[in-house]
Amino acid sequence: MTKTTISAIIDRLGVTRYTWTIWILVGLALVFDGYDYIIVAYTMPQMAQEWGLTKVQTGSLASWSMLGVVIGGVIAGMCSDRFGRKKTLAFFVAFYSLLTFPIYFAPSFAVFAMLRIISGIGIGACIPVAITLASENFPTKNRGFFTAATLCFYGWGWVLGGIVALNVVPVYGWRVCFLIGGLPALYAIFILYKLPESMAWLIGKGREAEAIEIIKRMEKVATGKSGEWLPGSIVLPAPAKKVGVSALFSSGYVKATIGVWLLYFMSMFIIYGVTSWMPTLLVERGYGLVLGYSFSILQNLVGSIGGFATGFVADIIGRRKNVIISFLFTAAAILLLGSVTGKWPVLIIAVLVGVCMQYANGGALPLMTEIYPTEFRNTGVSWAQSFGRIAGFLSPLVVGYVQQVGLDFSNTMKMFAFPAIICVLVSVFLIVETKGRTVDSVVGIKA
């Protein structure tokens, strides 16, 4: 009897309609996730005015959800590795949606903060689960592109948030934006019925028959017919000696874990500091609500180009080299943004910063999914994301503080060049190359 692995099957079939279906189904969950997170950035000026908030309190509007995001990321990995990727994703999509809806009725800053912390648990849980589920269904030679491109959906959620706010806030007020944020709960039901479970996870749990049924569906989509699969024909990779959080710091993984954690922390500090405050800073500089919001929408929309490009380039030149180059360009673009003057030069360079940020962050994603085996892959991804979200909590507060003590727009932007340089150094000394590594072949990273 011929034996094979899940990775070998996926690699043999290549990119098919099944691949694109997985990408879109997972991606839509991230669109709604991105909307529910970013909508705060577009309603910060109105909430600050209604509740009479200081600059630091205004910055905290974008930070409260990050407390929940950290918690969500931590528990999502363990839930996903135990109960399955699909069920965990569907549950947390419903969770963050149903907890965003009540913000429409929030009577005060304190109630808003409480609801955002709780809904943030779901927001934080979805990204690592979605990225892990998607990456386990992509061919090895295309995985860098598809994994990075999957995160573009999250950015498109930010674009959606800006479009909704631009049309809703002036007419109906900021609260309706959160009412709309409750609608994705319906998509959770769709996920349960339409999204296949990860075959790698099913095999790891001894559910080979279910994995074979999915394989047959893949083959029919790709070739028009399915093969005969006997029980025991799919080979399991050698089981990991450890599982859970302790495995992330075991021999063979500790250096890679530290490197990825630092890389993602600094990347999140840049992205969430810039994107959370940019609409408000532009409005305060006299750009007006329409122009300020339109620019932020454009920044996130064009930024998705970086997300697509980084995965494509990473599959060609390698993950490590791609990350080093991307954060060098990010630092340069940020310094340029802090140096230019004039309305249109600022807007043009700020769009460039958006592209560079998304390119750099997307370049780090394949590393997360490729350095850990199936048994604790989602735990590894989720803990790295959770650690990074701590920076997402701190960054808007730091920007609020430096604004409150008098730092101007230019110097505030230049501040973000430092974490970009740190990312370059981390990539040089701590990151190892994972290009070409199949999801079944991970048995330890020897750095």
Image (spheres, rainbow, N blue to C red):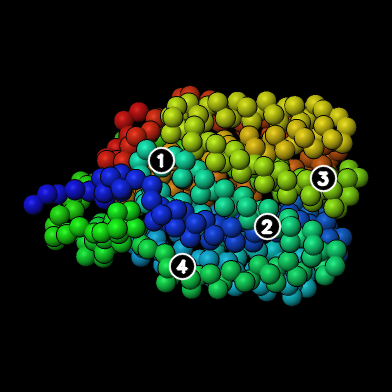
Q: Earlier in the sequence, mark 4 or mark 3?
A: 4
Residue type for callout 1 = Asn
Label 2 neighbour load within 10 Å: few <14, some 14-19, many 20+: many
Alpha-carbon distance for marks 3 and 1? Answer: 39 Å
Q: Which mark is residue 281?
A: 3
Residue underneath mark 1: 142
Does 442 sit left or right of 305 as displayed? Answer: left
Alpha-carbon distance for marks 3 and 2? Answer: 20 Å
Q: Position of residue 377 (x, y in %)?
A: 37, 49
Does 24 sit left or right of 333 as displayed? Answer: left
Report helix, strand or loop for mark 1.
helix
Does 26 sit left or right of 136 as displayed? Answer: right
From the viewer's side, name the closer residue of 387 and 299: 299
> Farthest left residue?
1
In which image quadrant can residue 434 be found?
top left
Residue underneath mark 4: 191
Vertical order, 405 against 203 (above or below): above
Front label number (3 vs 2): 2
Front label number (4 vs 3): 4
Q: Earlier in the sequence, mark 4 or mark 1?
A: 1
Residue type for callout 3 = Leu
In which image quadrant can residue 444 be found?
top left
Q: Earlier in the sequence, mark 4 or mark 2?
A: 2
Q: Position of residue 39 (x, y in %)?
A: 70, 59
Alpha-carbon distance for marks 2 and 1? Answer: 27 Å
Residue underneath mark 2: 160
Residue located at (47% from left, 40% from top): 145
Front label number (3 vs 1): 1
**Is the C terminus in the top left, top right, bottom left or bottom right quadrant?**
top left
Q: Is residue 61 visible?
A: no
Q: Position of residue 384 (x, y in %)?
A: 48, 45
